[in-house]
Amino acid sequence: MSESTDRLISGLVDGLEPVAPVPRLRSACGVVWLIWVLFSGFILWSKPAAPVWSEWTAQPFYPMSLLALLAAAFGGTLSALASGQPGRAGSERLGLAVCAGGLLAAAVACLLGMSSSGSHTGGEIAASTSWLASLSLASPSHAAADLMCLRRGMLMALVPAVVFLPFLARGWTTHPMRAAWVCATAVGALGAVTIHSSCGLLEPGHWLVGHLGIPVVLSLVSLYPLGLWLKRRRG
Amino acid sequence: MDVTEVVLSRDDADRERANADRERELAALMRGAQAGEADAYRSLLTSIQPRIRSMVRAKIHDDAAAEDVVQNALLSIHRGRRTYRPERPFGPWMRAIVRNSIIDHFRDRKRRGDREVELIPEEWADERAQGGGSVETLPPELAAALRALPDGQREAVTLVQIEGLSVAEAALRVGISVGAIKVRAHRGYRALRKALEGERPGGEWKSSTPPPTGSRRPQKGGRS
């Protein structure tokens, strides 16, 4: 043992203060999901144009894409929270695999939906845009609906983000950039599920851009600043 | 099973039992450390040092660099101690942090390269090594250049190069991360080099202090 290391250990011991351990991984995941479920429930309850069961079965790729997005959201949450606890590499990797697989499956469901028959126009577009009439879009169209859902989804992602960040702040990430990507994707996927379950436009092309685009855009925009922040917090 | 196999399997079982006892002991010490018990924390850090050192030496063969990484790992364990869950095994938690310190070392080395900064000639480094490290013992132009640095850079250079602390010790003393102290020290070396190049055009020293003699290797700018 070198003299310098001896001095360091003495310095660390002298500066020791009690700390509360981070919450259990399953408790942290539970808190994030509970708050997200409550928030999404409120949105669905207040949204008049959410798809009803008959519409779900009329468009089979809708429940497929919804379940896939849910899987991506849950997997991403698990991976992001596990990344803040060293030694949880197994949970981190499992969550990452489920997240990536979920996003891929959602994209495939959208593409399959687009290639099948039954694209919806007119009434569904009007229904999806009427709910947020305050946005005052000049003329409803897919592009406008895509943009609107992207914006709404990113706003809705703020709610799980606010719950997520304190958990990450207390953690010690072994791979800050990867943790940042997974966290942004998870938060985006949670926002996407909220939008996907409340959007009245049963159009797979719209889901691909306006809903699945939420985690993609969020992760691109926040990867670097969030990764840098996590790296600095780690020290 | 023959006798040899019985003995070997009994040895394996004993070894496993000893490892499990050791793990439980370290987990208990870590719980004590989280509660703020200084004795438990000192025992823990002293006990895990050999393990950390052997993990590091398996990947890093340079003595000074390996010791720096060991210290960085200890500092990271200190900073991340709240992330240890008491019901989980201690070993995987510790190993993840140590592995990360090793990866950071290689990443850092790749980023900075092996640039050497001709800054403090050997006889001044020797004086520091003999425990005489202080700004007063430096040549006047170096001392003046050091005083002209911004506070953070001057502090980093003084702690690491003059007082001879390791990067991890300096980071702990100042209360910032290892990465941050390295950045400050590196910027300080660059600024000093610029200032000193102006002081000695053509390699001649303006002061009465004799130039370094012999063909000894100049001091590296930063220990890791």
Image: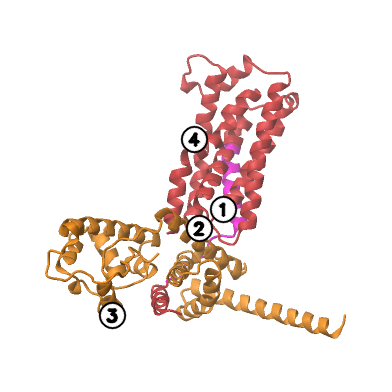
Chain colours: A red, B orange
Chain holding disc 4: A
- Are labels 4 and 1 on one chain? yes
Chain holding disc 1: A
Chain holding disc 2: A
Q: Nearer the viewer, residue A7 or A113?
A: A7
Q: Secondary structure at mark 1?
A: helix
Horizontal side of residue B87 vs B140, given as left or right: right
Q: What is the crowding at mark 1: few (fewer than 14 residues within 10 Å), some, or many (at least 20)? A: many
**According to the image, label 4 marks what residue?**
A155
**Magenta highlight range:** A17-42
What label sits on residue A81 in the rendered view?
1
Q: Who comes first in sequence, dot 2 or dot 4?
A: 4
Amino acid type of the residue that numbered disc 2 sits on in the rendered structure? Gly
| Relative image position of residue B212 (x, y in whole percent) | 23, 70
Magenta span dominant secondary structure: helix
Amino acid type of the residue that numbered disc 1 sits on in the rendered structure? Leu
Residue B20 appears in the figure: yes
Residue positioned 21% across, 59% down in the render = B149
